[in-house]
Amino acid sequence: MRIDEQVVLVTGAGRGLGAAIATAFGRAGARVMVNYRRSAEAAAAVAAPFGNRAAAVQADVTDAAAVSTMLGEAEKHFGTSVTTVVHNALSDFRFNGDARPKIGEIAWTDFAPQLEVSLHGALNLIQAAAPAMAARGFGRIVTIGTNLFQNPVVPYHDYTAAEAALISLTRTAAADLGPQGITVNMLSGGLLRTTDASSATPEAVFDIIAQSTPLRRVTTPEEFADAVLFFASPWSRAVTGQNLVVDGGLVRD
């Protein structure tokens, strides 16, 4: 199915990387549901340029009933079910390694919010979206991860552990759903220039990362978003259970 024939749900799309992903799909002609938890005005602004081909919808991805309702609203708005889900929602987090607790300081309770959004949120989305995808014989599920579990240069223990769990769910879901025509893949990024989450990162860190990549620059949200479209496109129809690292060549998986 071509991208301009798809109905795409992007979670956490009111700002940052999610907004860039939703915008990229909208520009490619897809119908897009822009999910948000609290950023209502920002999500509406992301959807606005695409007229009736996009809409903002509020839901907390950790609430299975809210996710199911959100998918129903998408089908009602567009007249057909969601074909493509991008799980980008992120628990409240600031990418500043100097301010993060070290392994001797972090508490187990710090892991729960990350696991709830990354892992539980993904499970809710997959379980809610997969039946309609299977009935159609086509579905694309894309999760958003991090290169930090391959290159743990900063002590984001809770965030990194949750994203590592998410890649495992991505791969087991791919094996389970593949016979129904549904692919499940992950894209993993590094530090992006610049989102709300990375705004607390010192400029010196951006400079170090830029000099460590073959491209000699830090990846932008827009560049990352373009790579997401690959996993929704016909060119990736034989690709599933994979993790594509999009960080300018910093990490080679």
Image (cartoon, rainbow, N blue to C red):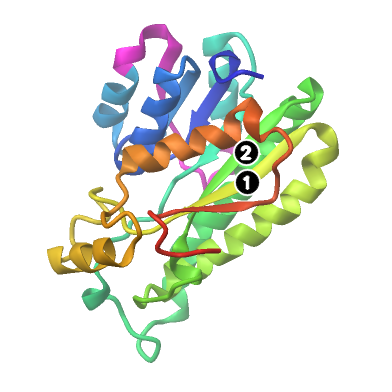
Residue 84 drawn at (x, y percent): 60, 29
The residue positioned 61% from the left and 18% from the top of the image is 2
Q: Which of 242 and 176 lies nearest the eye of the viewer?
A: 242
The residue positioned 63% from the left and 46% from the top of the image is 185
Q: Residue furthest right?
A: 179
Q: Which mark is residue 185?
A: 1
Q: Which mark is residue 87?
A: none
At label 1, the amino acid type is Asn
Number of marks in picture: 2
Residue 8 drawn at (x, y percent): 53, 25
Q: Secondary structure at mark 1?
A: strand
Res 37 visible: no
Residue 177 drawn at (x, y percent): 79, 41
Residue 202 drawn at (x, y percent): 15, 66
Q: Rate crowding at label 2 as few (under 14), some (14 to 19) or many (20 or more) other CA atoms within 10 Å.
A: many
**Badge nearest the viewer, 1 or 2:** 1
Res 28 visible: yes
**C-alpha span from label 1 to label 2:** 6 Å
Q: Which of 125 and 189 lies nearest the eye of the viewer?
A: 189
At label 2, the amino acid type is Ile
Q: Secondary structure at mark 2?
A: strand
Left or right relative to 246: residue 215: left
Classify the position of the C terminus by image quarter: bottom right
> Please, is residue 17 above or below residue 6 in the view?
below
For the magenta stretch, what is the residue range? 48-67
Residue 60 among those drawn in magenta:
yes
Q: CB atoms at circles 1 and 2 under 8 Å apart?
A: yes
Q: Which residue is mark 2?
A: 141
